[in-house]
Image (cartoon, rainbow, N blue to C red):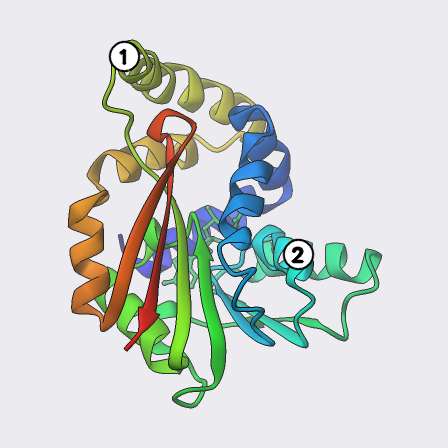
Amino acid sequence: MQKEYVRSLFDNIALRYDLLNHLLSGGVDLYWRRAAIQTLTSQQPKSILDVATGTADFALAAMRLHPEEVIGVDISEQMLDIGRKKIARRQLAKTIQLQSGEAENLTFETGRFDAAIVAFGARNFEDLDKGLSEMNRVLRKDGKIVVLEFSRPQIFPMKQFYFFYFKHILPMVGRLISKDKEAYQYLPDTVMRFPEGKDFILRLRNAGFASVEEQRLTFGIATIYTGVKS
Ligand SMILES: C[S@@+](CC[C@H](N)C(=O)[O-])C[C@H]1O[C@@H](n2cnc3c(N)ncnc32)[C@H](O)[C@@H]1O
């Protein structure tokens, strides 16, 4: 999807983004982020990059690992503004810093981070392969990537329920609350198109990651992918 389009879409819904996230997922998004962060527990990364950080929920969840620094980057200044306020309220500004930045052109030096993470952001990258390669580049050797992303349940009746919810209920509720006609139509459209399972694993391998694994959550509505920079 075109970067300018995605930026203005998230700028427009920034104020309602957190509310809608929790409402439309029934709060389960918080559990998904925690489960994704847990995959880094044994590695205990000191320096973490959160790509497409948005309002910083994934960066904040990463604080459970007690890192020395978390840097979040995003193309939407309005999303970052909300994130900065949340960080200030929790008095975490010394540890978490948010910056304007594109996944496809990260401005950090090679090997800078112990872990690179992205939640519900990879689906929006204009160039997925470039974004994943950049995340690989800024990781140190043996550094870990964690990607949390929507996926599509395969089994009856969750599959049918999910498709109905995603195609009809979610865009309607999203439209009413965000007052944005397109944003919550865009969400199901991108989820339907996004590579999942072995297709996404292949993209991670092509970007330079080894030991790639997937963990499906909540009937396969979301999936955690992990990999190691070889
Ligand atoms: C659905 S939100 C996810 C935010 C956050 N990670 C979370 O867990 O709630 C997707 C975010 O990706 C950002 N984004 C989209 N394309 C991007 C890109 N190419 N580089 C950096 N951020 C991007 C958007 O601005 C938006 O804030």
Q: In which quarter of the image is residue 103?
A: bottom left
Viewer-closest of 85 and 199: 199
Answer with the quadrant where ligand 1 appears in the image: bottom left
Viewer-closest of 184 and 208: 208
Viewer-closest of 152 and 228: 228
Quarter the C terminus occupies? bottom left
The amino acid sitting under disc 2 is Leu
Per the image, label 1 sits on a secondary structure element best described as helix
Q: Mark 1 points at which residue?
A: 160
Q: What numbered label is drawn on residue 24?
A: none
As drawn, is 55 to the left or to the right of 190? right
Height in image: 53 above or below 136? above
Q: In which quarter of the image is residue 31?
A: top right
Residue 70 seen anywhere in this rendered image of the structure: yes
Q: Quadrant of residue 181?
A: top left
Residue 86 x/y as whole percent? 74, 54
Residue 207 x/y as whole percent? 22, 70
User: What residue lies at 41% left-to-right and 69% top-to-bottom?
Assistant: 144
Question: How many neighbours does mark 1 have within 10 angstroms: few (below 14), some (14-19), or many (20 or more)?
Answer: few
As drawn, is 169 to the left or to the right of 206? right
Which of marks 1 and 2 precedes in the sequence?
2
Per the image, label 2 sits on a secondary structure element best described as helix
Viewer-closest of 6 and 24: 24
As drawn, is 33 to the left or to the right of 168? right
Q: Name the residue under label 2.
A: 60
User: What residue lies at 74% left-to-right and 60% top-to-bottom?
Assistant: 87
The amino acid sitting under disc 1 is Gln
Q: Distance between the residues labelled 2 and 1?
A: 33 Å
User: What residue lies at 29% left-to-right and 67% top-to-bottom?
Assistant: 132
